[in-house]
Structure formats: structure tokens, C-alpha cells
Image (cartoon, grey):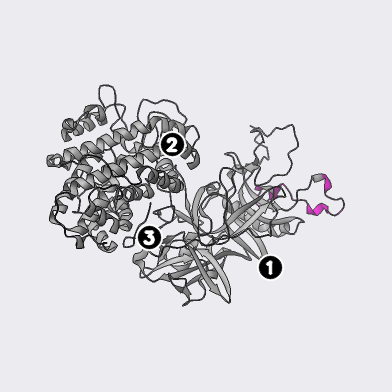
Amino acid sequence: MDYLSSEHHYAYLSLADLLLAREQFHAHLVHKRHVIGTAVGRYLIRHDDPPNGERTTPKGARTLENSEVREYSWPCVLVFVDRWVDESEFGKGELATSDYVPKTIYMPDGKAVPVCLVLAPRVLTPPDTRPAPEVDAEQLQGGLPIVTATQGAEYRATIGCLLTDGHKIYALTPRHVAGAAGEAVGSIGTSSVYQLSRVPFESVYAPWPGKHAFVNLDVALVEIDDVTKWSSGIESIGPIGPLAALSTYNLSLNLIGCPVRAHGGASGPLTGRIAALFYRYKSVGGFDYMADFLIGGREQAPLPTLPGDSGAVWVVDSDDDEYARNQPIAVQWGGTVLGTSERQTTFALASNLSTICRELNVDLYRGSSVAAFEYWGPIGHARIAEFASLLVEDEHLATLLQNNFSNLGTLANFPDTLFKSMRPDERENHYADVDLARPGIRSLADQTPSPQSISLQVWRTYYGQINAHPTTANKVNLGLLPFRVAQVFNDLKRIVANGDTEKIVAAMGILAHYVGDACQPLHSSYLSDGDPFRTKLGAPVQTMLGHGKGFGGGVHSAYESTMIRDKSGPLSTGVHAKIDGQTHGLGRIDTGRQAAWAALELMQRSRAGIDPMALVNFYGAGNKSSTKLWNKYRTQTIDRMVDGSRVLAMLWDSAWRDNHIPVQQLNAKTPARLKTICSNTNFLESLALGNVPDEVLD
């Protein structure tokens, strides 16, 4: 090592270092010819640049399209220019030597900060708009479009999410659409006094430097009229996680490249990555304006955001961290188009949602008293219930279900959205790893080959053996999905006998969730979120890794949630084509044992239809996009949903028969009343395997 070397270790630079360097030299940079803006982030490496930095051809212009952030990318100040000029041209003709942008900024404390030059001229022609889609007034949630009119002009934006001041609940949307306090905002409510336009950078990010700079926010809260019509989730995303609370204490360059997604009122589902932080995009009267986040496309695809997406809330879209997934992080308030003559790319400009909540003194509302809509993920469970309602054979039951069609999807998701937060023994009800065998221990599938062989004691003994096995360092949870189906089926029969149609609808909707789990291959396999006996890179290990820590980790949400969400349209079309005009056509059953066997057989068919190991291998080989998964498993996924819908309809018909419920009671039930029923922890009580009574199989 050369101890006297003056080499600068760029990798050790912090976000505060970059902001200080940018602050001291921003004025100099933006006064150079062709510089249009600055940001901070990580150095962009051209796609064709070799890892060692050696190349035999000229580099040419660096653009946002031909470059990427790599693991070894330095922290840097990003400088955007509208023309790429060779070094030899400076000092000749129209370009003065002083217009040259230096490659490094040297700081008074001896640190040196790299400068990454990017060709990204602004495109001033606005993109085309689209007509705002129709809003179903009975299903309001984040991501939906909103339209207002002022002085003869129409303004379009997006409802972001719900916030609360502890007393009332509000919808977040752009200030320029909400208008002044007291104004009606579409048909959803009234603009409140909670509004922000811009705030000084140093007031929200002290002690970071940013004199004469404003953070643009442009948000307003709308006091909603009827909270019972609202979901606390976001369309195409589902339930949101806790707020990603970012401040000067934890906001870092680790955010660069963070995958995020949103639902724009104009564009629909959007997926992107955070490309840069604190993008200074204009100067007015000696003051600079900046966006906290510059969000671009993902996987070298452009971000298709459009005017009307302002207000959309961006959430973390990471498969690596289950806690971080769906955490709201930013609010989009605008966009900018950067590009070259060959290609133009749209970026979203967004503000830190933590800043907005702090400045307005409000909290993210994730809700306990509002409705919840589609969210294997939520969409899969809701669709199973809805399709099954079309397959029942009993005419009166069909009437009850059709009258409560809008309730079924919400009820089908309650085991996830309501039960798991209220019932400590609920989670194991959703799965059972029946294909896991170890030396000397047969799998549960092998030990349960017939209805007569179904035994609580067999399952309890198996779990005791498998968790004592030396290869099982991470204990296998005691999944009991078939027994949960048996329990709910028996309870449903008793409820039908009592004639309480509110509880009947509630129990039928809840049963849909567990049958939906049973028809998904990953819910009955130890490969539920990757192969725990291989590392992330595919190397075999003897001792089982934790959930999602092995090869193909992340496949569960990618297949069951993201793909189903993104392909819900063709999925529904495919299922309808197979069930149109049919009934389930299955023989009815009488006992809990038969219900458990129906669930177990469904689980077996699901794994036979989509081999979990093949799915894990396909995903682990880099096929992680919704489109690739859908193209590979489209037909099999449709078949799984059809199978699950038929079994659910059979269970409903079996529990319903021999009742004497008057036709006038087969009416639509109040959503609030159904939620009250399901909020009672004694209703369809959640039990751990050790507490399930033997009578469940009667």
C-alpha cells in the first residue's frame, strides 16, 4: 500500500457530502452552457462498459438509456446537459473554456466528489393525455382518478392514499386540483385546510445544506364524505405497509435503484426505480426548486407516466425485504421528459411522504373500519369467491350469492387483512408443506393417501419429527390448511341450520380464502418462497435456510400477487371462458373429513398442475417479470383457479342443502355488519394445530 498516496476513496462519501458539494458548486454548474439541472446519486456506467474500465472504442455520450448503476458505482453529483460536447471543442468557437464541467469537485475538508455528466435534454412538448377512467363510487381507494373544474379549465390528478389527523380521515391529492379549503372536490369530499405548496429545503432536511432552495410538494388533503366507501389500500397494489419514515437520520444513497410501484389515475399500474435524489430542476428569482426523488423506468423500459398521475403514491416493491414491501415512500406531483433525439424518457418527480406527514402533522391511515378491496394476493382470493358464485347448483343459494357479489371479494380477503392482525393462531391456517420429506421421515402427502388416513395425530407427530431433524435449523411452522377447511365447513353447516343469512354470507366468503390458498401450488409446498436447500446462487446446503432466503426467494409474491395483479384481466377472461354456463358438477359431501380431503386433493392437483420446483427454478433463472411468468404458466394458472372455484362451489352447496331459509332473507347484506361479525374472534375461531379438536373431522 502507498501510505502517502492522495487517492480519493469515493465509495466512503455520504449523502450529506454530496449535498454539500452540490450546494457549494451548484450555481457554478448551472451557469455553464448546456447544463440544465443537477441531482445526487450514484455514478452511471454505460451498459457496454467493461467492469475493469478498459475499452477499445470511444465512449460517446452517456445517457439515461445507455447507462446503469452497478454495485461499484461511486456516490456522485449528477449533472444533466442538453448537449454532449467533446473535450477538444472547449475554448473554440461558441464554447468557452469556462463552460467545461469538471470531473471532480474538491471540497475544503480535502474530500473529492465525482461529477457524472449525463446527456438528458428536457423535452418541452407534453405527452398525450388519456380520458380519465370511470370511478366506481362504491369502491373508492388510492390510485383512482379525480377531475375538477376551475375557471372553465379541467384539472386531472390521482387520489394517493388516506391520511388522518386522529379525528378525521382524508384523501391525499395535489393542491392544484383540490383548490382552496372548503371547495368541493369531485364527488368524494371537501378540500381541507391541510395544504402544502413548497417548503425551504433546510427547514425539512436540517442540517443538510440547501440555501435558497425549495422542496416542491403541491399536496392537499380532502375531507372525505363517507369513510365506509373507502379502502385504505391502493388500486392494483392492495394493502399498504407502514410509512417509510425517511429523514436526515436514515435517508441514504441506498435508495438509488430501489424498486417502487404506483397506480396512476391516468396511466394505471406503474413500476419504476429511484434514479436520483434531490433533483434541482429550475431556478426562479434566485431560488432553486427541487424534487426529493427522480423516478425512472425499470429493466431498461421507460416509465409510462402521464399527466393526471400527479398525487399517485409510490410504494417500495422489494421481494428481498417482506417488511419493506408496499411501504409508501413518495408522492408524485409532476413529471419531466428527458432524452435525446433518438429516444425520450419520462421521469416522475416525487416528494418524500414522510415530509408531507410531518409538515401537516398527520399520519398514514392503514385502516380498521373502512372497506378493503381486491388484493393470491388479494385479487386471486376475491376472484375465486366471485367465480364460485357462478357455479353453485342450488337456485336459492345462487340468489343469495349474487345479491352479495360485491361483498364476497372483501370477505375472501379478511383472513389476510383482518384475522392475521387480530388472531395469533391464524397464520398457520393458510398453508401446509405436505411435500416436505427428510431421510427417515415421509411427507404428509405420503402419510395421507386417503380420506380415512387423515389424522390430527399423524400431522402432529410428523411436525415433531421434522423439526427435530438435524437438517431443519429453521423450524417448519405447523400448517394445517385442510383442517381449517374442515373446521369452517362444519361451522358453516351449523350456521346454515340456524338460518342466520348474515353469518352465512360471512362464513362463505371466509371459506373462499382457504380454498383459494389450497388451489395455489406454493401454499402446499416447502418451496413456498424458494428452495431452502439451495443458496441464492444455487449452491446446495444440508441445513434448511429460512423462508425466502434460498434459491428463487421472492417467487411467492412474484407469482401469487404481482403476476395475478398485473394479469388479472386475461386471467378473468380465461376462467370465464372455461366456466361459462356450467355448475361445479361435483358430488356433495357431509363431513369435515370429506371437506379436509377435498382440500388436500385440491392441494395435490395444484402441485401436479404447476410443479413448485419447476416454478422456483424458472423464477430463479431470472424470469421474474409478470409477463415471463404469465407466458410460462398462463394456462396452468387459469386451470388452478377454475379447479379452486369448483371445489369452493361444491363446499358451499354441500353446507347449504336441507335449509328452510325464506326467499325474502336472501338479500344483500350491509358491509359494515359483515365486518362486525368477522371482527369477533369467536366467529370461525382460529386454532393452532395442537388445539384443533378431533371432532373437526366428524
N-terminal label among 1 and 2:
1
Q: Locate the N terminus by quadrant.
A: top right
Q: Main secondary structure of the magenta part?
A: loop
Secondary structure under badge 3? strand
At 61% from the left and 61% from the top, the residue drawn is: 290
Q: Amino acid at mark 2?
A: Tyr
Secondary structure under badge 2? helix
Residue 21 relative to residue 464: left or right: right
* Quarter occupied by residue 678: bottom left
Q: Locate the C terminus by quadrant.
A: top left
Neighbour tally class for label 2: few under 14, some 14-19, many 20 plus, Cα within 10 Å = some
At 59% from the left and 39% from the top, the residue drawn is: 72
Image position, residue 585 (x, y; %)? 26, 41
Kindly report the distance in space between the C-alpha atoms of the residues bearing marks 2 and 3: 31 Å
- Looking at the rendered structure, which numbered label has been put on residue 286? 1
Image position, residue 230 (x, y; %)? 37, 63
- The residue that mark 2 highlights is 633
Q: Which of 635/50 is in front?
A: 635
